[in-house]
Image (cartoon, rainbow, N blue to C red):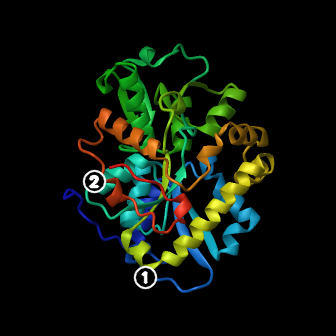
Amino acid sequence: MDNWTPTKLDRRTFLKLSLAAGGAVLVGLPAAACAPAVPKGLFEGQTGGVGMTSTVNHATFYIGEAKGYFADEGIKNIITEFQGGSDVARGITEGGLHYAIPAVSPSVSAFMQGAPIRIIAGQWAAATTIGFAVKPDSPYKSLQDLKGKKVGYSRPASLTHFFILKAISTAKLTPNDFNLVAVGGAAESRTALVTGVVDCSWVTDSIGVQGTLDKSLRVLFWAHELVKEWQETVIAARPEFIKSNQDVLKRFLRAYQKTMDWQTKNLDEAAKIWAEAVQLDVTVATQLMKAVPKEAFTTKLSVPGLKVAEESMREVKLIDKPVPWKDLVDQSLLPKELQAELPG
């Protein structure tokens, strides 16, 4: 793990990095890279991920806020939207996010390059949030039809990058059969598709479902068609911040799991809260919420999901050696019943 070169970022540089990655950052929050212990009381946690306003796995943030579960624990989440999972990982390792929601693949890639990142909990144990779409009137019916065409994904080493490589491998094709294009975040991806910059591109679950309903796009395939057991995203932080702020992280994780537990028992109300918070059609929100297996709503890591993620990352050559899960993952902040028996 000697390939990672740390970059010391001041606050202005982090803002530029985040904005370049598609983020809207609240100025004036303390940088997490220094990892100072925070005082007791209300903690404004700088966090973020990909599709924060458009994928069902992030609905928990808005529902927990509305139900007061985060406030009960003294947590206020300040959310930044990023264009790709590798940008989220960099936000943790270099940029000052206190805790964030990267996918497994960029977390593993960053760690195995020597970056200071640790997974502290699961966040979403299902492959339900990503698809690849084409224009509704396009002639493409399968991935094979797109040979030689431009296919968009978010960022290198991101979850969308992984899934397009996985789809290509499953179809017994190679990346050289396509012109793979890093198009950025969900909104940028949709724009690239509808304007013809690419012939096929990634979509979030809500954009895919809404586009199907209003006939503005056609989903070619969903990620869950490629993998069954899956740990899609995790909660991660820098080791220094974990060490200095265990109480803050325990409070955050407690509120997060409490919100998830409430969601699974109140799907219709949860969907309404989420739809209102992110200005999403309530019909789409409800459809997405109810399509998710209940097993996805947990901070407990899916061991089969981690194993499949590792096997798949090796298959598409994102890594070339076993993942040291017990070094990468720190479950000490979770209650015993939510701690998983890690592979390896």
Q: Nearer the viewer, mark 2 or mark 1?
A: 2
- Give the class, few, some or many, for how many residues have Cα within 10 Å of label 1's Cα (few <14, many ≥20): some
| The furthest residue to the left | 2
Of 209 and 72, the residue lying toward us: 72
- The picture places residue 220, in percent across and down from the top left corner, at 54, 23
C-beta proximity under 8 Å, tags 2 and 1: no
- Give the class, few, some or many, for how many residues have Cα within 10 Å of label 2's Cα (few <14, many ≥20): many
- The picture places residue 229, in percent across and down from the top left corner, at 50, 37
- The picture places residue 154, in percent across and down from the top left corner, at 44, 42
- The picture places residue 331, in percent across and down from the top left corner, at 45, 63
Badge 2 amino acid: Met
Badge 1 amino acid: Pro
Of 34 and 74, the residue lying toward us: 74
> Under tag 2, what secondary structure?
helix
**Residue annotated with mark 2:** 112
Compared with residue 28, is residue 219 higher up or lower down, i.e. above or below? above
> Under tag 1, what secondary structure?
loop
Compared with residue 259, is residue 9 higher up or lower down, i.e. above or below? below
How far apart are labels 2 and 1 at the CA level? 25 Å
The reply, left or right, for residue 165 in relation to residue 203 is: left
Residue 251 visible here = yes
**Residue annotated with mark 1:** 36
Q: Identify the image quadrant of the N terminus.
A: bottom left
Which residue is painted at 44% across and 56% down in the image?
88
The reply, left or right, for residue 265 in relation to residue 57 is: right
Q: Quadrant of residue 304?
A: top left
Residue 214 visible here = no
Q: Quadrant of residue 68?
A: bottom right
